[in-house]
Amino acid sequence: MSTQLAVHACRSLCSWHRTRTELDGLPLLACRGCGSQWVRSEPWTPIDHTGCIPDDVRTELRR
């Protein structure tokens, strides 16, 4: 990746959603709790504070 993602410590407030931004041509998702960011090319999968994979993340994983 040419641009680095923001990665912050989890505060147990995770709520992942798609943003209006792209990173290296991929939709950028961000956590509303801590501000961390994720794109589907990352080797990890975000989960919400409930322990579930959010719908926006599932959509990206299917691509």
Image: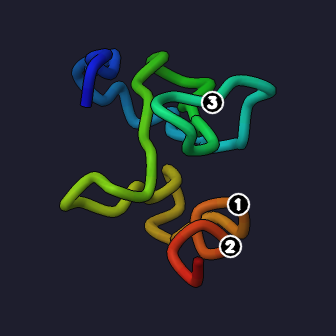
Q: Is residue 33 left or right of residue 10?
A: right
> Compared with residue 11, is residue 12 higher up or lower down, i.e. above or below?
below
Which label is found at residue 22?
A: 3
Q: Residue at x 27, y 52 (%)?
A: 42
Q: Give the x, y percent position of residue 10.
A: 30, 30
Q: Which residue is mark 2?
A: 59
Measured in 3D between alpha carbons, the distance from the residue under mark 1 to the one under mark 3, in whole angstroms, is 14 Å
- Please say if the residues under marks 1 and 2 sit with CB atoms less than 8 Å apart: yes
- Please say if the residues under marks 1 and 3 sit with CB atoms less than 8 Å apart: no
Which label lies toward us, 1 or 3?
Answer: 3
Mark 1: amino acid: Asp
Mark 2: amino acid: Thr
Q: Give the x, y percent position of residue 45.
A: 34, 62
Mark 2: give few (<14), some (14-19) or many (20+) Cα within 10 Å.
Answer: few
Q: Which residue is mark 1?
A: 56
The quadrant of the rendering that contains the N terminus is: top left
| Nearer to me, 53 or 38 | 38
Q: Give the x, y percent position of residue 63.
A: 59, 77
Q: Residue at x 63, y 30 (%)?
A: 22
Q: Residue at x 40, y 55 (%)?
A: 46
Badge 1 marks a residue whose secondary structure is helix
